[in-house]
Image: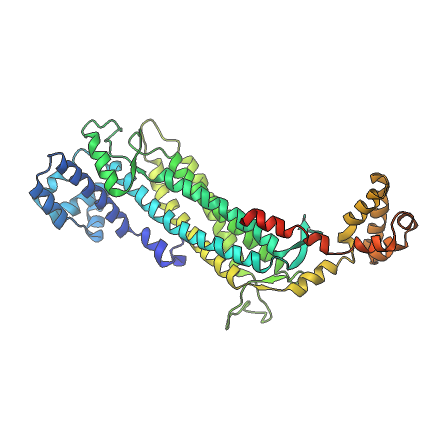
């Protein structure tokens, strides 16, 4: 469990107090619906509304005896309401209350998380625009490839987080349903109008059909959306971790006044927050697997999902909320080193321009295979002998026969690598 990392908003949603509060909200909405249909006298409804409440400590005390949480809850409520409590839970089964309340808890959590994700999305946009022309090396397989900009790198994350917003909105719609349809979903002791009226009051839609529970593909969708979001946030964190390595040092996590990086090595500034994000993302991903397993229940319902959901939903939401907050603080206050980025571009002594030389040779009529051999020969020599690639290319007679000195020089300009950055930004942000 990860309660120690809880931020006030998300952690408060998943307290026992709030869970029982949602149970009571469902019971009261059902009572109001029954009253509108003439099954609960208005005077009794007023008493229920005025007196209905519960004590978490009392519920715990009762549950130790009855071994049933809903019965313990209802007993606690009845002790406060008195004789009118006979109308509470009329025609319901436990999961009419528990599942509908769980949808309310998840809905509340998703709405909070979506607000935070949208804020993070805007932050990434600002950083992408700020570093739109901050040139750095692009890497494939961890090896220098060709120049990009740091803003372009952040723009990729911005676009990806935008897709998560769409997924979370879809998951919110999927989970914004309840069920008040009785022991196996057939309304045997209920009027279907009760479900419609009660759920409307709660801000939910009725599931068109359910068994004793809402079908768990809905819940698995939510957990999967959280896992995908957490994984993208980890992807950003892993990039920070790589770029903060001493031999790279293009980017650093914020290091606050008084912070210490190591108990033994005073010089250390470690990307510990990004590493923590990686750890929490693993938890959220693992919980998505539990959500998939919970889809498979016996017949109209067993309780194999129930105990797991009491862990995976609070932990997934609290972890996702925490790692998102950590990532936002990192992105908002990181230290970018443009000079180091430029130094790393120059570190391979011009090798990153090999494709430009290759294409220049083919444009002048050299067969691609022959051009590739010429460029690779000089590339390997520059690499193994620690020589300047541009100088080797300029001195190669096979190149000199095809390219003028100014054409060779043009191959080593950074300008072409920035030429379409504006186009990409406009395509994403328009």
Left or right: 231 as drawn, with respect to 92? right
| Residue 36 spot, x, y in % from top left | 14, 37
Q: Residue at x 61, y 48 (%)?
A: 424
Left or right: 8 as drawn, with respect to 161? left
User: Quadrant location of residue 172?
Assistant: top left
Using the image, determine if residue 158 lies above or below residue 245: above
Tally the numbered discs: 0
Q: Is residue 89 visible?
A: no
Using the image, determine if residue 353 lies above or below residue 270: above
User: Which residue is at the front of the view, 305 or 97?
Assistant: 97
Q: Is residue 316 visible?
A: yes
| Residue 164 spot, x, y in % from top left | 48, 45
Which colouring convention does the figure follow?
A: rainbow
Q: Residue at x 46, y 48 (%)?
A: 283
Outermost residue toward the bottom in this view: 258
Left or right: 24 as drawn, with respect to 340? left
Left or right: 19 as drawn, with respect to 263? left
User: Quadrant location of residue 292?
Assistant: top left
| Residue 143 spot, x, y in % from top left | 70, 51
| Residue 3 spot, x, y in % from top left | 38, 55
Using the image, determine if residue 370 lies above or below residue 236: above
Using the image, determine if residue 200 lies above or below residue 142: above
Q: Residue at x 51, y 69 (%)?
A: 256
User: Which residue is at the front of the view, 144 or 146?
Assistant: 146
User: Quadrant location of residue 226?
Assistant: top left
């Amino acid at each position: 469990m990860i309660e120690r990392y809880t931020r006030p908003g998300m952690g408060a949603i998943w307290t026992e107090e709030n869970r029982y509060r949602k149970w009571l909200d469902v019971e009261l909405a059902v009572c109001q619906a029954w009253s509108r249909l003439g099954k609960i006298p208005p005077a009794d409804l007023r008493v229920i509304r005025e007196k209905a409440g519960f004590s978490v400590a009392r519920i715990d005390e009762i549950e130790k005896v009855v071994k049933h949480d809903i019965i313990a809850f209802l007993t606690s409520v009845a002790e406060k309401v008195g004789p009118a409590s006979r109308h509470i839970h009329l025609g319901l089964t436990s999961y009419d209350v528990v599942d509908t309340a769980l949808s309310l808890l998840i809905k509340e959590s998703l709405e909070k998380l979506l607000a935070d994700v949208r804020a993070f999305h805007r932050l990434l946009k600002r950083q992408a625009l700020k570093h739109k022309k901050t040139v750095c090396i692009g890497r494939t397989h961890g090896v220098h490839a060709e120049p990009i900009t740091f803003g372009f790198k952040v723009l990729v994350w911005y676009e990806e987080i935008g897709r998560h917003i769409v997924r979370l909105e879809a998951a919110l719609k999927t989970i914004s349903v309840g069920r008040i349809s009785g022991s196996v979903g057939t309304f045997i002791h209920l009027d279907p109008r009760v479900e419609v009226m009660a759920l409307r009051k709660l801000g939910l839609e009725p599931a068109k059909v359910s068994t004793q529970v809402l079908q768990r593909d809905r819940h698995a969708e939510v957990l999967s959306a959280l896992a995908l979001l957490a994984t993208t946030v980890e992807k950003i964190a892993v990039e920070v971790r790589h770029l903060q390595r001493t031999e790279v040092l293009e980017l650093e996590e914020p290091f606050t006044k008084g912070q210490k990086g190591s108990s033994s090595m005073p010089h250390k500034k470690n990307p510990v927050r990004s590493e923590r994000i990686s750890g929490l993302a693993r938890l959220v991903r693992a919980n998505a697997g539990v959500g998939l397993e919970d889809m498979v229940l016996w017949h109209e319902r067993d309780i194999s999902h129930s105990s797991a959901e009491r862990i995976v939903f609070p932990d997934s939401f609290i972890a996702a909320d925490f790692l998102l907050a950590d990532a936002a603080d990192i992105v908002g206050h990181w230290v970018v080193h443009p000079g180091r980025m430029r130094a790393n571009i120059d570190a391979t002594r011009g090798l990153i321009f090999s494709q430009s030389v290759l294409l220049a040779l083919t444009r002048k009529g050299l067969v691609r295979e022959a051009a590739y051999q010429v460029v690779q020969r000089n590339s390997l020599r520059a690499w193994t002998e620690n020589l300047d690639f541009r100088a080797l290319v300029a001195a190669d007679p096979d190149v000199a026969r095809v390219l003028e000195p100014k054409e060779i020089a043009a191959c080593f300009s950074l300008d072409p690598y920035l030429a379409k950055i504006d186009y990409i930004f406009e395509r994403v942000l328009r």
